């Protein structure tokens, strides 16, 4: 009976394996994107400290990077939240 149960569950187990692998790949990609954004923020701060950027340029670029980081974490921006509430 155990052998028959194993045969019947094989397609389900195979599908679960595929889903787990897809989830692992998505998580690895998200982690890579996060590391890239954090590195971009560090470069941006160094550019500001070195006087290569004005405060206004820094603020604009930082806002874009932080928004992308929030999107990566699934955090809706205030503008998005207001537009969905209306």
Image: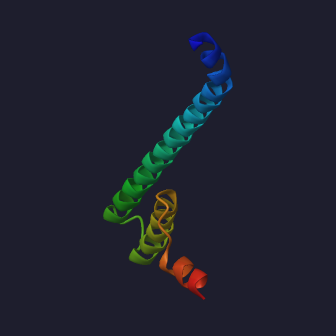
Q: Quadrant of residue 44?
A: bottom left
Q: Residue furthest front?
A: 1
Q: Is residue 41 left or right of residue 18?
A: left
Up the image or down, 84 lies above or below 58; here it is below
Q: Residue at x 60, y 36 (%)?
A: 19
- Number of numbered callouts drawn: 0
Q: Residue at x 40, y 53 (%)?
A: 38
Place of residue 23 in the rendered image (x, y in percent of width and height, measured from the top left): 55, 39
Q: Quadrant of the C terminus?
A: bottom right
Q: Quadrant of the N terminus?
A: top right
Place of residue 63 in the rendered image (x, y in percent of width and height, measured from the top left): 46, 71
Q: Quadrant of residue 18?
A: top right
Q: Residue furthest bottom?
A: 86
User: Is residue 34 or residue 45 the one in the foreground?
Assistant: 34
Up the image or down, 37 lies above or below 57; here it is above
Q: Residue at x 45, y 50 (%)?
A: 34
Q: Residue furthest left?
A: 49
Place of residue 75 in the rendered image (x, y in percent of width and height, measured from the top left): 47, 66
Q: Quadrant of residue 83?
A: bottom right
User: Is residue 34 or residue 14 the one in the foreground?
Assistant: 14
Place of residue 67 in the rendered image (x, y in percent of width and height, measured from the top left): 49, 67
Q: Residue at x 56, y 85 (%)?
A: 85
User: Is residue 1 or residue 27 the one in the foreground?
Assistant: 1
Q: Is residue 11 left or right of residue 61?
A: right
């Amino acid at each position: 009976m155990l052998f028959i149960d194993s045969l019947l569950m094989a397609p389900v187990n195979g599908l679960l394996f595929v889903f787990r692998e897809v989830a692992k790949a998505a998580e690895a990609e998200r982690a890579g994107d996060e590391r890239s954004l954090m590195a971009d923020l560090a470069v941006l701060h160094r550019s500001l400290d070195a006087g290569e950027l004005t405060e206004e340029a820094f603020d604009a670029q930082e806002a874009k990077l932080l928004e992308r980081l929030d999107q990566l974490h699934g955090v809706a921006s205030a503008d998005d939240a207001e537009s969905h509430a209306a």
